[in-house]
Image (cartoon, helix red, strand yellow):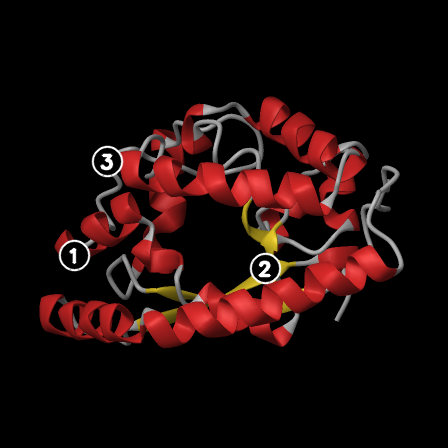
Amino acid sequence: MRLTSPEIEAPASGLRGWRAWVKRAVDVVIAAAALLVLFPLMLAAALAIKLDSPGPAVFTQTRIGKGGRRFQLYKFRSMYQNAEDVRASLLHLNEAWGPIFKIRSDPRITRIGGILRHSSIDELPQLINVVKGEMSLVGPRPPLPEEVAQYGRRATGRLSVTPGLTCLWQVSGRSNIPFDQWVELDLEYIRNQSLWLDFKILMRTIPAVLSGKGAH
């Protein structure tokens, strides 16, 4: 299912032809290998979540992908089961800029969830989204439908490529960056997209994740 509005403004992208095929092949090989290698860690995370609070270990959420297409994103559950139900009552605490919702000390986050978020382990199930082709290893982070509904024409350019696990925003401070700058970083990535840029972002992601900077 595609999102019909707002109209997507697509910046020029450098990845076409064989480069696009190589990017997809790299995505599948690395994501599949990572799932195998990280399976014990993911199993331990799932067990910790189940022991810490009631509810499923894996949380699915509708996100918007390339061209406005909706898909189900997978994450380890880091919040209590009723997190979505109480979101509206916490809007006045929003610390983020633009059409996104972030609270540094979100009361909906479980004890284990805080650890998973700080270490980015909660994002590991999205490797399945990568294998399925709904996401890439590198690309703009996939937004929520209600966020896209508030986008201006320029921000919709983020939807012109396949969303990713990591991106320039991810390695530049994450939640510490205002939304307008986040959009500009994504558009910069799309305009300069290359296999070499993807490699550099992946290498920068490792220290960014280890530092936990902006992860909340």
For disc 1, the neighbor class at 10 Å (few under 14, some 14 to 19, many from 20) is: some
Q: Amino acid at mark 1?
A: Ile
Please tell me the numbered disc located at residue 139: none
Disc 1 versus disc 2: nearer the observer: 1
- Tell me where residue 16 appears, x and y as whole percent: 87, 54
For disc 3, the neighbor class at 10 Å (few under 14, some 14 to 19, many from 20) is: few
Decide which of tag 3 and tag 1 comes sooner along the chain: 3
| Image-based side of 168 in relation to 196, left or right | left
* Quadrant assignment for the C terminus: top left
**Which residue is depicted at the point 63% across and 45% down?**
198
Q: Amino acid at mark 2?
A: Arg
| Image-based side of 205 in relation to 109, left or right | right
Q: Quadrant of residue 58?
A: bottom left
Q: Quadrant of residue 76?
A: bottom left
Please tell me the numbered disc located at residue 112: 1
How far is mark 1 from mark 2, CA to CA?
Answer: 24 Å
Disc 1 is placed on an element classified as helix
Disc 2 is placed on an element classified as strand
**Which residue is depicted at the point 33% across and 50% down?**
120
Q: Amino acid at mark 3?
A: Ser
Please tell me the numbered disc located at residue 63: 2
Of 25 and 139, which appears nearest the observer? Answer: 25
Please tell me the numbered disc located at residue 105: 3
